[in-house]
C-alpha cells in the first residue's frame, strides 16, 4: 500500500537552530523557505518549521508503559536498522533524551523500540521501530 505524504506545520523559536537540527542532525533536505518558515523533507513527508516562539514545546504528558510521554509529539516509524543508526548518531552527538532509546511493550503485542527527544525549540519528537511492522496497530 502506498502511503500519501503527510504535512505538519509546527512552531519553533529560532529558524537557524531548526535548520541545524532538522537539516544537519536529522539529515532532512530543505525545500522552500522564507524569513518565517522552512520546509523540510522528513523521509518523504513535508514538515514546516514556522517561527512562533511563544507556541513551541509540549503541554502535557501521558503515562505509557512506565514513561511520561510528552503531548504533543511527532516523529517517524523507521525500520530497525535505521532506528539503531539514528539512536547511535543522537547518542554520539550528546543528545539529551526525554526517554532514552528503549524497548517498550516488551513481549507484548506492539513491542517497539522507541526514543523521545526535543528539537531546539522544545518540540518533542518520537522515533520508533518494530521488529514486526505488522504489529504497528496491534491492540
Image (tube, rainbow, N blue to C red):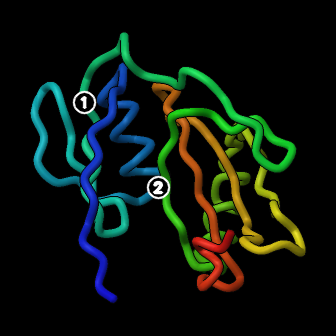
| Residue drawn where x is 48% and y is 47% of the image | 74
Q: Is mark 1 on a helix, strand or loop?
A: strand
Q: Give the residue furthest to the bottom.
A: 1
| Residue drawn where x is 24% and y is 30% of the image | 50
Dot placed on the residue nearer the N-terminal end, 1 or 2? 2
Q: Are marks 1 and 2 in contact (CB under 8 Å)?
A: no
Percent coordinates x, y for residue 41 in the rendering: 28, 60
Quarter that holds the N terminus: bottom left
Q: Give the residue furthest to the front.
A: 139
Quarter that holds the C terminus: bottom right
Graded by Cα atoms within 10 Å as few (under 14), some (14 to 19) or many (20 or more), the crowding at tag 2 reads some
In the rendering, which numbered label is found on residue 3? none
Q: In which quarter of the image is residue 37?
A: top left
| Residue drawn where x is 82% and y is 50% of the image | 65
Determine which residue is flagged by label 2: 26
Q: Which of 79 and 1 is in front in this view?
A: 1
Judge from the rendering whether residue 37 lies leftward or rightward of residue 34; answer left or right.
right
Tag count: 2
**Mark 1 to mark 2 CA distance (whole Å):** 18 Å
Graded by Cα atoms within 10 Å as few (under 14), some (14 to 19) or many (20 or more), the crowding at tag 1 reads many
Q: In this view, does 109 lie above or below 122?
A: below
Q: In this view, does 108 lie above or below 98?
A: below
Q: Is mark 2 on a helix, strand or loop?
A: loop
Q: Which of 96 and 123 is in front in this view?
A: 123
Q: Nearer the viewer, mark 1 or mark 2?
A: 1
Q: Nearer the viewer, residue 56 or 2?
A: 2
Percent coordinates x, y for residue 119 in the rendering: 50, 36
| Residue drawn where x is 60% and y is 85% of the image | 134
Determine which residue is flagged by label 1: 50
Percent coordinates x, y for residue 109 in the rendering: 77, 74
Judge from the rendering whether residue 91 lies leftward or rightward of residue 16; answer left or right.
right
Q: Give the residue furthest to the top.
A: 54
Amino acid at each position: 500500500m502506498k502511503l500519501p505524504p503527510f504535512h505538519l506545520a509546527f512552531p519553533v523559536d529560532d529558524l537557524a537552530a531548526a535548520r541545524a537540527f532538522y537539516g544537519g542532525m536529522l539529515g532532512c533536505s530543505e525545500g522552500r523557505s522564507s524569513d518565517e518558515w522552512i520546509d523540510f523533507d522528513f523521509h518523504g513527508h513535508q514538515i514546516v518549521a514556522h517561527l512562533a516562539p511563544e507556541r513551541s514545546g509540549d503541554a502535557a504528558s501521558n503515562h505509557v508503559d512506565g514513561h511520561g510521554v510528552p503531548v504533543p509529539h511527532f516523529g517517524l516509524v523507521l525500520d530497525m536498522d535505521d532506528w539503531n543508526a539514528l539512536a547511535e548518531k543522537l547518542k554520539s552527538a550528546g543528545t539529551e533524551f526525554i526517554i532514552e532509546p528503549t524497548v517498550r511493550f516488551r513481549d507484548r503485542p506492539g513491542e517497539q523500540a522507541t526514543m523521545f527527544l526535543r528539537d531546539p525549540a522544545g518540540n518533542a519528537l518520537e522515533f520508533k521501530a518494530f521488529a514486526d511492522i505488522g504489529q504497528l496497530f496491534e491492540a
